[in-house]
């Protein structure tokens, strides 16, 4: 979408240098994306600080990491079917 806005060119040039962008369009889009990332990180940090971020317990972690098929179950199946 094309939009006309007045931009502080000195600030835009400074930000372009920081972000490594070459065009005003790329600078504005990269700056907007960076603001969004910063806000999402801030929200995540707030959830960690206030304890509302769901964190699995050690038992839940072990259950999630456990193999879906018991170790060795498939190798014994192959031996029986090869006979």
Image (cartoon, helix red, strand yellow):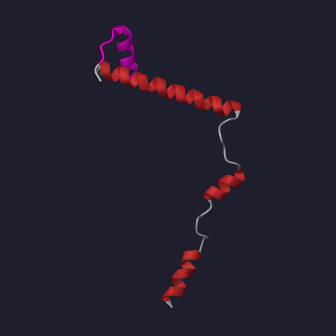
Is residue 58 or residue 4 the one in the foreground?
A: 4
Q: Residues in magenta?
A: 3-21
Q: Residue at x 48, y 26 (%)?
A: 36
Is residue 9 or residue 7 the one in the foreground?
A: 7
- Lateral position of residue 41 relative to residue 11, left or right: right
Could you say where residue 59 lies in the image, as x and y percent from the top left?
Answer: 71, 54
Is residue 39 or residue 21 the one in the foreground?
A: 39
User: Which corner quadrant of the image does residue 76 belong to?
Assistant: bottom right
Image vertical order of residue 82 relative to residue 54, above or below = below
Residue 24 forms part of the magenta stretch: no
Could you say where residue 13 lies in the image, as x and y percent from the top left?
Answer: 35, 13
Q: Residue at x 40, y 20 (%)?
A: 18
Could you say where residue 67 lies in the image, as x and y percent from the top left?
Answer: 59, 64
- Lateral position of residue 58 relative to residue 31, left or right: right
Residue 5 forms part of the magenta stretch: yes
Image vertical order of residue 29 relative to residue 8, above or below = below
Q: Residue at x 36, y 8 (%)?
A: 8
- Lateral position of residue 63 relative to residue 23, left or right: right
Number of numbered callouts drawn: 0
Looking at the rendered image, the quarter that the N terminus falls into is top left
User: Which corner quadrant of the image does residue 44 belong to?
Assistant: top right
Residue most toward the bottom? 83
Could you say where residue 39 lies in the image, as x and y percent from the top left?
Answer: 53, 25
Image vertical order of residue 59 relative to residue 12, above or below = below
Q: Residue at x 54, y 81 (%)?
A: 77
- Lateral position of residue 78 relative to residue 61, left or right: left
């Amino acid at each position: 979408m094309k939009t006309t806005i007045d931009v502080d060119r000195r600030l835009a040039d400074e930000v372009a240098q920081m972000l490594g962008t070459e065009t005003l369009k790329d600078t504005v889009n990269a700056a907007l994306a960076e603001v969004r990332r910063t806000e999402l990180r801030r929200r995540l940090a707030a959830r960690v600080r206030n304890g509302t971020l769901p964190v699995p317990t050690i038992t839940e972690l072990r259950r999630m990491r456990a193999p879906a098929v018991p170790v060795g179950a498939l190798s014994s199946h192959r031996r029986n079917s090869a006979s």
